[in-house]
Structures are given as C-alpha cells and as structure tokens.
Amino acid sequence: MNIHRPTYPHTHTFTHTHHILSLKSLFFFFLFFVFFLFFLFLFLFIGQQVTDCMKYLGIYIKSASNFRCSLDNAKKSFYRAFNAAFRKVGRIASDTVVVEILSKKCCPMLYYGVDCCYITGVQIKSIDFVLNGSFRKTFNTRSSDIVRECMSMFQFSSATACIARRKCNFLRRLMSSDNLI
C-alpha cells in the first residue's frame, strides 16, 4: 500500500543537483575569496601613504644619505596662510598692509627651521618662486621685473638673503650658548 504524501509548490525535494556545490562553483567561490582578501590587504596596508620624511619639532627631515629637510609642508602652510589673509583683506587693504601681513604672518611659516638645515640651491629657488608668486598675486602682475621692483621698494629681502641672515644668527647663538649638546 502506497501512502501518498502531498507536495506543496513552495517546498522542494532534496536533490543532489540543487543543493550540493559543484567543484566548479566551489573553485570560483574560493577564487573570489582570495581576490577579496588580496584587495583588502592592498587597501589596508599598501594603500597607506608611504613617505620618505618624518616630522620632528615642526621640521620635516628627509630620508637621504646626509641631513636634508623637506620644505613641502612649509610651502603648503605658507600658501594656506597667505591665501586666507589675502581672501580677507586682499583687494580691500592697501598693498603695504598686504605685504606687511605677508612678511609678519606668512613668511615665518616658510622660514621655520631653515636656519638649522642644509638648504640646497633648488630649495632656495623654490622658496623664491613661492615669494614671487605671492607678490604676483598681491600686485596682480606676471612680470618678474615688476615683482623685483616691488620687493625692493617694500624692502622685502630675497629668500637667499633671508636664509643667510637667519643661518648667521642661528650659528652666532649656537656658538655663544653654554649648552654642550
């Protein structure tokens, strides 16, 4: 005697073809999982910014065979301060006020730490480029002759002269110091 069991449309009978993963699908699942872990590793570890300099007392020291400093962050700070000040008072205030703000508030950020570091000629030229760019923006000109004339008119020293003066002052204070370290 056969007992008839009713089947309902929403239930499935257990068959091997529907519920057991085939080797092919298991292989693709494993491959997907390995790629997922690989990209997770890339994102978490290799995606971190690798840098060749470290910050010590506000000075960024480069990884090199001799002692070098990086001025990239100093230039960023200078640009940030100059653009903020120029946005507030740029076209409203006189040129004298803008140059005074530039020399008193922005240049210390640019020159911080250059007196104790070895600065190459390329780095000095990059500082000159930053200063010339700020004067170009202040006086709304593209001419380097006008920028040089404005710098001399406002008695704004070049980066070379300012760095040399700061290095002399630093070495004079270092020699007169009682600190043996």
Image (tube, rainbow, N blue to C red):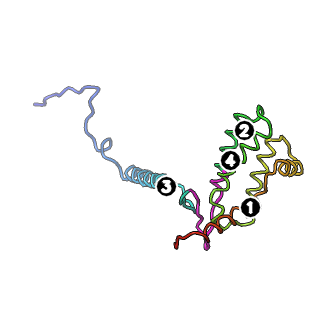
Q: Mark 2 points at which residue?
A: 86
Q: How far apart are marks 3 and 1 (CA)?
A: 38 Å
Q: Distance between the residues labelled 2 and 3?
A: 41 Å
Q: Label 4 near label 1: C-beta < 8 Å?
A: no
Q: Quarter-wise, where is residue 168 in the image?
A: bottom right
**Location of residue 160 with respect to 17 vertically, above or below:** below
Q: Distance between the residues labelled 4 and 3?
A: 39 Å
* Mark 2 surroundings: few (<14), some (14-19) or many (≥20) residues within 10 A: some
The amino acid sitting under disc 2 is Phe
Q: Label 3 near label 2: C-beta < 8 Å?
A: no
Q: Quarter-wise, where is residue 84 in the image?
A: top right
Q: Label 1 near label 2: C-beta < 8 Å?
A: no
Question: What is the secondary structure assignment of the residue under circle 3?
Answer: helix
Question: What is the secondary structure assignment of the residue under circle 1?
Answer: helix
The amino acid sitting under disc 4 is Cys
The amino acid sitting under disc 3 is Leu
**Location of residue 107 with respect to 123 vertically, above or below:** above
Mark 4 or mark 3, earlier in chain: 3
Q: Mark 1 points at which residue?
A: 124
Mark 2 or mark 1, earlier in chain: 2
Q: Which of marks 1 and 4 is in front?
A: 4
Q: Name the residue under label 3.
A: 42
Which residues are drawn in magenta?
58-75
Question: What is the secondary structure assignment of the residue under circle 2?
Answer: helix
Along the line of sight, the residue nearer the viewer: 71 or 2: 71
Q: Name the residue under label 4.
A: 106
